[in-house]
Image: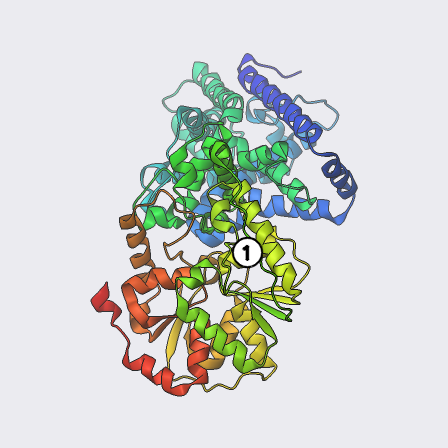
Amino acid sequence: MHFHPFVLPFLLGLIFIVVFFVVKIIYWYQNLLIEEKIKFIQSVFTVKTWLAIKEVFFESLLHRKVFKINPLLGYMHSSIAFGWFLLILIGNLESRLYHPSDLNPPYYPIFLSYFDKSSHEVYWFAEIFKFVMNLLLLIILTGVSLAVIKRFYAKLFSMKKTSSLKWSDKIPLYALWLIFPFRLLAESVSAGYYHNGGFLTNSLGSVLSSFIPEYPFVEMFYWLYSISLGIFFISLPWSRYMHIPSEVVFIFFRNYGVDFSPANKAVNEVEVLSCSRCGICIDTCQIMSSARVNHIQAVYFLRGVREKKYDENKTFNCLMCGRCSNICPVGIDVNKYRLSQRIKANMQIDLPADKVKINPLEKAKVGYFAGCMTYLTPSVKEAMIQILNQSGSNWIFLDEKSGICCGRPAKLAGLTSKAVSLQNALKELIASAEIQQLVTSCPICLKTFREDYKLSIPVDHHSVFINQLIKDKKLIYSRLNLNAVYHDPCEMGRGLGIYDEPRELLDKVIQLRNHQYEKDNALCCGGSLAGFRLTNQEKELITKDALEKMNVADMNILATSCPMCKKTFARYVGNKVSDIAEIVAMAMKTKEGQKHISEQISIKELL
């Protein structure tokens, strides 16, 4: 049996991490809710397992999503992850072919070049293996080199910031940086004396052997290689690199349909541990890119959740716009955890809202709910009244006389009891009208109605409703000779995935121009109800930066479908910003459309 004491650091580290992770998996499974365990068992021998394996291959090894976002960063991650995976896989295959009848210990393929110095002289395919293994090692070394450069010069990767690290992250990081250089040196010095290397190790070995003696340097470099592997394995559970095994479990859980609600703590731990702290979320955060506020981004917040350290600033200083979750290569729902933390923080002051007296409404087919934010932009409400009346719809204004908040602002603050009491009152109001369809102008209300109210009727944004009215030929309008860019509201776009209907509607009445920051990549207006810790100056920076990036200056109109966004943008561009309902109302009266042109305010003068 092949053995040398230098294998012990690697072997002990490997045993530790395998035992640790097996225990973790058992713990996660045992703490699943009964219904989730049933889902898991029923999914194992289905196509879901194949889909999970496929996702692990493309995302955990090849890092396909990272490639799409940042090709250089994607290469860095995949060269290390996939390269190392292939190095292990092909190394094991090579050792099996050389010694098919032996029961080789797990360290044998890792240190094959030391234990097997003569097989390359016996087997014709040995040179192929040596070439492939050297090529993989070279690819991994380029990835490691890029990782080192990224840590100190992020701008090369078109990144403004990389995530800051604690010592629990730095120790395995430095060990990872050393693993493959030490392997290169160990195999090269060995190849210099035994000529059992490939194109890379033989070439370097011939140089090193000219001034480095075989003893003690061959074994010394193998010791260093083994120690760096052992340190990496033993420090992994307390570092960012715990994402490597956790992400695999997370992908399987997600494909099996396991519930990731905050109540399911074991599953949530898997999701939080799956954050690799790649730093992609830092630059995409507008609080960082526009307002220059750092260390509150998703990567830092999730680290606090993982370490069970509550930080009020990280919890409440967030727009909750969803840009970080949308761009996250792993697909972690960050807003869910921020909301959960806010609920815990405000538990002692969370009281039900005062009882609201409900006056029953007349019966109608369509119920229109303006929402609090629409009352702050009354022209949107007036446009909807005009559209509803002209369409001949059988409708009722739900909150015309008794305005009740949908409960979303209270929910975003973590005041669950208050939110629920408001929702119950509004449910009673909606039920009294016996409507068959609920239409709202506010994406904030729309998201709440769809996710929290559990209504048995369709709930639509007014852009979807108006678009259907036009399809049904219930509105008469003229196309406006105006061009516009459309701003996707966070709650309606990333929050609910409503992208096409507003654009389809705008294309009917106006010339719509595309821009870089739309749909999934849309920018928050800066007026989010969730940004409790942002100063007015920071919000202003976010708003102005968003307007500049959308090239609003070159357009007649900035179109949006959110009264909050309209109110926020209007501070800087005046009546140049219009809600979709207002634009349609203008198209129904061509003269008003022309009036809008004459009253435009130059954004260049206002910014």
Q: Is residue 415 left or right of residue 291?
A: right
276 to the left or right of 128: left
For the image, the number of numbered tags is 1
How packed mark 1 is, by other alpha carbons closer than 10 Å (few <14, some 14-19, many 20 or more), is many
Q: Of residues 202 and 572, which is closer to you in this image? A: 572
Is residue 144 visible to us here? no
In the picture, residue 470 is in which quadrant?
Answer: bottom right
Indicate the position of residue 209 as horizontal and vertical percent values. Answer: 41, 24
Residue at the disc numbered 1? 447
Q: Measured from the top left, where is residue 275 in percent x and y?
A: 51, 38
Residue at figure coordinates x 50%, y 70% from the top left? 502
Q: Is residue 152 above or below residue 474?
A: above
Q: Quadrant of the C terminus?
A: bottom left
Q: Amino acid at mark 1?
A: Lys
Query: Which x, y percent locates residue 394?
Result: 61, 76
Name which residue lies at 33% across and 76% down: 556
Residue 471 point in image, percent of width and height: 59, 80
The one nearer the camera, 34 or 140, is: 34
Residue, x 20% and y 68% (percent of image)?
605
- Left or right: residue 260 compared with residue 136: right
